[in-house]
Amino acid sequence: MAEKGLRASDLRAKTDAELRILLEERAQELMNLRFQRASARLEKPARFRQLKRERARILTVLAQRRRGLREERNAK
């Protein structure tokens, strides 16, 4: 069964620490896929796109939270 990607709504339910851990895991997996591609042993080339999109979603949620905190401070 194919693994489904992370949804932004699922990511928003996680803490910043959990998101950073996910981000590190995705970066590590992406690096491993690059090594597999270089050695011609890559089984799932579509996983590259999925990982890049998941990393972008995680970074977006983290950025939104940082911006939200700044906006709250400015409103006070």
Image (tube, rainbow, N blue to C red):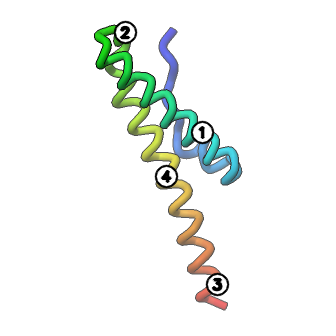
Of the residues tagged 3 and 4, which is closer to the observer?
4
Distance CA(mark 3)–CA(mark 4): 21 Å
Return the mark for residue 43.
Answer: 2
Q: Position of residue 76 (x, y in %)?
A: 67, 91
Above or below: residue 63 compared with residue 47: below
Q: Which residue is mark 1?
A: 22
Q: Earlier in the sequence, mark 2 or mark 4?
A: 2
Pick whichever of labels 3 and 4 is earlier in the sequence. Answer: 4
Q: Is residue 76 above or below residue 33?
A: below
Image coordinates for residue 70, horizontal then vertical, percent: 58, 78
Secondary structure of the residue carrying tag 3 is helix
Q: Quadrant of residue 73?
A: bottom right
The answer to whether the residues at label 3 and label 4 have Cβ atoms under 8 Å apart is no
Mark 3, mark 2: which one is toward the viewer? 2
Residue shown at 37% from the left, 14% from the top: 44
First of labels 3, 2 by sequence position: 2
The alpha-carbon separation of the residues under discs 3 and 2 comes to 48 Å
- Going from N to C along the chain, the mark reached first, 2 or 1, is 1
The residue wearing badge 3 is: 73
Residue 13 or residue 23, whichever sits in front:
23
Q: Nearer the viewer, mark 2 or mark 4?
A: 2
Kindly check if marks 2 and 1 are in contact, taking CB atoms under 8 A apart as contact.
no
Q: Which mark is residue 59?
A: 4
What is the crowding at mark 2: few (fewer than 14 residues within 10 Å), some, or many (at least 20)? few
Estimate the spatial distance between the alpha carbons at disc 2 and disc 4, rounded to whole Å: 27 Å
| Amino acid type of the residue that numbered disc 2 sits on in the rendered structure | Glu
